[in-house]
Amino acid sequence: MATIQQLSSGLDTIWVVLTAAMILLMEGGFALLEAGFVRQKNAVSIIMKVFVDIAFGALIFYFIGFGLMYGKDAAGLIGTTGFFMGGDLTHIALNISHETYWLFQCAFVIAVISIVSGAVAERINFRAYILYTIAMTGFIYPIAGHWVWAINGWLSKLGMVDFAGSAVIHGLGGFSALAAAIIIGPRIGKFSPDGTANIVPPSNLPLASVGAFILWFGWFGFNSGSTLSATNTSIGHIAVTTMLAAAAGSATCILFTMMRYRKADPPMVINGALAGLVGITAGCAFVSDVAAILIGAVCGISMVYATEMLEARRIDDPVGAFPVHGISGSIGTLAVGLFAQPDSIREGTAGLFYGGGFSLLGVQALGLVTVCVWGFAITWGCLKLINLIVPLRVTRDEELVGLDVGSHGVPAYSQEDGFLDLQQLKNGK
């Protein structure tokens, strides 16, 4: 007869595997969202990058990343065991197996690199992107994650709190995306010689909307799954704060863009929901429902201003990766230091607005700056190095034709029937 411990472990394993699968499904959301936001001639290239994220990301995280992130460490800087899921991992005391834990964390690392892919869409060399994916999943993200989430990570020991990754995943990914967008430069024709931004219309907003809905769905696994326990009583509260923040982000963008542009702007509304989701990720287990609404609303408005700021500085981010992830991730991380309810994190700890003083807020700010600077600086260095190995950007002709044909030799949508009809007309048939 199974013991209570065995039953508990079995339930937790099922929960973690299912939520990991939900997070992996978010890659379908990323694929549709980005394919809808970019031009039709670059849709296949987006899908191919998502496959790179999953395939190379999973393998490199298994070989190297997990060990650097969760291996044993005396100094709080980098893990030294757990490569190839071997070595001493006894310090990871969970109610699930190490393999199950790896699967969940693998889904996270794939999400990180997917953030960067959108910022360099329509002009990055596919070979260069593969090399950067290896760097992000094997080195950049695991080390930052070790600082915050590993037992002996130096930011963890200081008391930094990031429940599901507003800083570790979204702040890091967003600022890495900013560095990548700056280095690779804007798309041809995005900016006029006088610096004015030209509109590059999305190819398929319904497709992008479906992608956003899939991401919204997967986020319940992202946040609630981070409990790593099927019997954790906070799962319901986490799901509610996640829902409210996303709704507030989207609703705020609807109203704000109606006032600012006199029309509700669809791309902004889509990204508003995602901004709310990013913002609540750090504090979903620790803040009240009302605070979640406020966080989502602030993230939505901030995302709009950040998008305008990038264009004013001639930085081309086709899907809004930095405004959605970098800005909202920063707001969400700091919001924990403001809105964390008393004793929700640990006994005697609360946010500034609940009488906790500046202690938690200060640690959150230090951790946020550290993680974001790390992501920006190391991405900058990695891309400069990669550019010495293979060209970072496709040729002008490839960009004008489109990466689908130029890099992959196939268009997203076949026009074969149309070509046949045209040929028949030319032949007088």
Image (cartoon, rainbow, N blue to C red):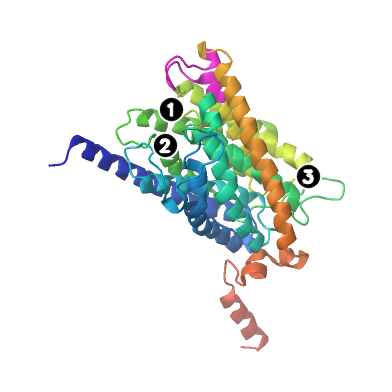
Q: Residue furthest left?
A: 1
State whether residue 222 appears in this view: yes
Give yes or no for contact between labels 2 and 1 (Cβ–Cβ under 8 Å): yes
Q: Give the spatial CA distance, label 2 vs label 1.
A: 10 Å
- Percent of width and height locating residue 250: 55, 35
On the image, numbered disc 2 is attached to which residue?
226
SS majority, magenta: loop
- Percent of width and height locating residue 320: 64, 44
Disc 3 vs disc 2: which is toward the camera?
2
Q: Quadrant of the N terminus?
A: top left
SS for callout 1 = loop
Label of residue 314 in the image = 3
- Percent of width and height locating residue 42: 63, 61
Q: Give the spatial CA distance, label 3 vs label 1.
A: 38 Å
- Percent of width and height locating residue 236: 36, 30
Q: Residue furthest top?
A: 355
Q: Amino acid at mark 1?
A: Ala
Q: Amino acid at mark 3?
A: Arg
Q: Quadrant of the C terminus?
A: bottom right
On the image, numbered disc 1 is attached to which residue?
285
Disc 3 vs disc 1: which is toward the camera?
1
Q: What's drawn in magenta, residue-wise? A: 335-353
